[in-house]
Image (cartoon, rainbow, N blue to C red):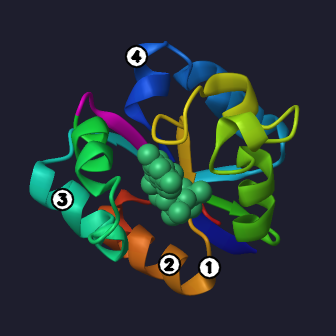
Amino acid sequence: MQETLAIIKPDAVKKKSVGKIIDRILQAGFIVVAAKTINLTQAQAEGFYAVHRDKPFFANLIRFMCETPIWVMILSKENAIEEYRELMGSTDPQEAASGTLRRDFAETITRNAVHGSDSRDSAYREIAFFFSESERIAAS
Ligand code: GDP
């Protein structure tokens, strides 16, 4: 079993898509190992997306991620990182395959509904960024 960090972003929260997205995640066979809502501070959002600090879209991305509380989850499944990236679809919802979360729940490349770790190193870092061991609610 492998773990990945998933986020439901403010655009999907505002559109009341959280329940539908979690249902799709569960139907796809992922186990939710930990989950919570959190209202990111600007500093937290900047820390989480530090790798994009120099990108032209950074300021917009940070403002967007702080619009509402987000939902963060640790998901577990065999090959979870790649499988959840597949379930999410391409970063730009216009390019995302049909049946993916971004195609079905997002509109623009910034406001793209969901996040998922892109590598083992990112998953490790991102899970530790949001969760302590005591916050795990299910065996992975
Ligand atoms: P992800 O792993 O598919 O989420 O994509 P990245 O790690 O490359 O980017 C992180 C987030 O920054 C994306 O999910 C988008 O919300 C945003 N983003 C990435 N690329 C662009 C871009 O070219 N333009 C804009 N406006 N936002 C972007």
User: Dot 4: within a 10 Å radius of its alpha carbon, few (fewer than 14), some, or many (20 or more) residues?
Assistant: some
In the rendering, at what x and y percent does residue 78 appear? 82, 70
In the rendering, at what x and y percent does residue 39 appear? 21, 39
The residue nearer to you, when weighing 96 against 125, is 96
Q: Which amino acid does label 1 sit on?
A: Ser
Vertical comparison of 22 with 110: above or below = above
In the rendering, at what x and y percent does residue 95 appear? 76, 42
Q: What residue is rendered at 49% in x and 25% in y?
A: 12
Give residue 20's quadrant in the image: top right
Determine which residue is flagged by label 1.
Answer: 119
Determine which residue is flagged by label 4.
Answer: 14
70 in magenta = yes
Q: Which amino acid does label 4 sit on?
A: Lys
Q: Are marks 4 and 3 in contact (CB under 8 Å)?
A: no
In the image, the residue with mark 2 has its CB under 8 Å from the nearest atom of ligand 1: no
Q: What residue is rendered at 80% in x and 55% in y?
A: 86
Which residue range is magenta in the image? Answer: 67-72
Q: What residue type is labelled 3?
A: Gln
Determine which residue is flagged by label 2.
Answer: 122
The residue nearer to you, when weighing 97 against 37, is 97
Q: Earlier in the sequence, mark 4 or mark 1?
A: 4
Q: Are marks 2 and 1 in contact (CB under 8 Å)?
A: yes
